[in-house]
Amino acid sequence: MIDYFKDLAKSIISRGNLRCYILNYSPPIIVCYEYDFFKAKDQIIKTLPKDRMSYVLFMLGWHRQTQQRIDDLVKDIRSFQAENDAVEYVCMANSADENRKIQNAGLKSFFCHQNAFIDTSKYKVVPDIKKSFDAIYVARITPFKRHELARKIDSLKIVGGYSEREIEHYSKIRAMLPQAEYKESVPSSKIYKVMNEARCGLCLSKEEGAMFVSAEYLLCGLGIVNTANIGGRDELFSDEYVVNVEDDEDAVAQGVQEIVRRDLSPHHIREKTIEKMNAHREKLINFIQEKCDQAGTGYDYASHWEDVFTHKLGIRVTVPFFSRQRKRILNKNTRL
């Protein structure tokens, strides 16, 4: 019964929510995932003015580094531009390579990593906690996450659910990794404690997006064992506390032992990660300030950043109902 009312409240609160966040009002600047925009583009475009410039920033949920995926992005954005030429679409690339490829395709883009917009207070180091596992993998149990590469890790925790259509794959992974302790889900407010029980985090996919969890590991002070990939997660990494390994179960297990051997300072890992995140936050602030200057608003955007910022820029997360950021969630009835 409690779950029913929670779901009902969530449904009421999110009614009309277009999964976009208003970063600035004059000029209008909103941010969203590109695929959320594609699903609700007609409603979102209606919220934007036609008599002055506005800006839509796209976070890229999945990489745009292969030619086919870039071609698809170009086709989509060109079609949007035809509907309202007073809107400028700008991609927030998760790697320098992705940024270059998008720009070479003739689109607007700047290198501004999505993981920089995690609320660092939600993921922290827990001092003196007992380390119960050598490694943790927080990842949905789906083929592209490649859990099978963790087969040789003796001390392992896996946190992740699975879809009904992938139950066969889930069963296969459970049989392949019987030594692991499994947890299907952990409340977002408690996941940092679970991460802190491990000595390192795993990043094993070959391609995806920037993988929020990779930065969450680091903010909790965990070193990382990482495979070669496209998507951009490496951009916040350092060889000091990330071991890059081959796509091989023995190499992954050896990487875990290397992280354990290094006996890294969790606070140092966290501090260095926040430094890298802040550099990317500054890029977004500078971008918006430039647009304010071009519009002649005389607005000092940086001085208002704390009033604007919320976890993951309010996209696909629950923004507290009574917070000042709540009003920045774009609604279908909004007119900017």
Image (cartoon, rainbow, N blue to C red):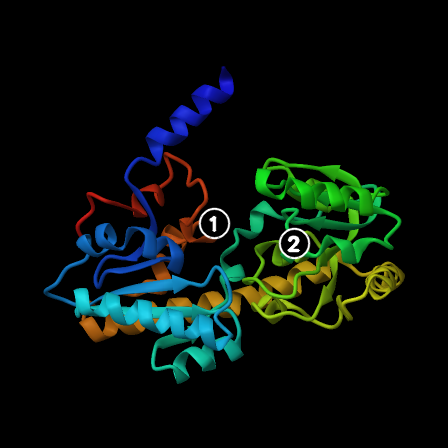
Q: Position of residue 44 (x, y in %)?
A: 25, 53
Crowding near the residue tagged with mark 1, few <14, some 14–19, many ≥20 C-alpha atoms within 10 Å: some
Amino acid type of the residue tagged 1 in the rendering = His
Q: Is residue 56 left or right of residue 3?
A: left
Instruction: Using the rendered image of the protein, determine whether residue 209 is visible from the camera's viewpoint.
Output: yes
Tell me if I can see residue 188 in this picture.
no
118 relative position to 268: left or right: left
Percent position of residue 38, x then y: 33, 57
Residue at (64, 69) in percent of width and height: 229
Using residue 129 as the reference point, say whether residue 91 is left or right of it. Answer: left
Viewer-proximal residue, 172 or 25? 172
Q: Can you give x and y, in whole percent of width and height, for residue 10 in the image?
A: 40, 30
Secondary element type, mark 2 = helix
Report the Cα–Cα distance between label 1 and label 2: 28 Å
- Answer left or right for 102 relative to 248: left
Q: Which residue is mark 1?
A: 311
User: In the rendering, at what x and y percent does residue 305 appear?
Assistant: 38, 58
Q: Which residue is mark 2?
A: 143
Seen from this angle, which residue lies furthest bottom? 104
Query: Of 270 and 14, which appears nearest the observer?
Result: 14
Query: Does residue 269 sit above or below 75 in this rendering?
Result: above
| Contact, mark 1 vs mark 2 (Cβ under 8 Å) | no
Above or below, comparing residue 210 to residue 196 in the picture:
below
In front: 299, or 46?
46
Identify whether 159 is placed above or below 52: above
Judged by depth in the image, the label closer to the viewer, 1 or 2, is 2
- In the image, what residue occupies the spot 88% across and 60% down? 257
Amino acid residing under circle 2: Pro
Res 14 → quadrant:
top left
- Identify the mark nearer the N-term, 1 or 2: 2
Dot 2 crowding, Cα within 10 Å, few <14, some 14–19, many 20+: few
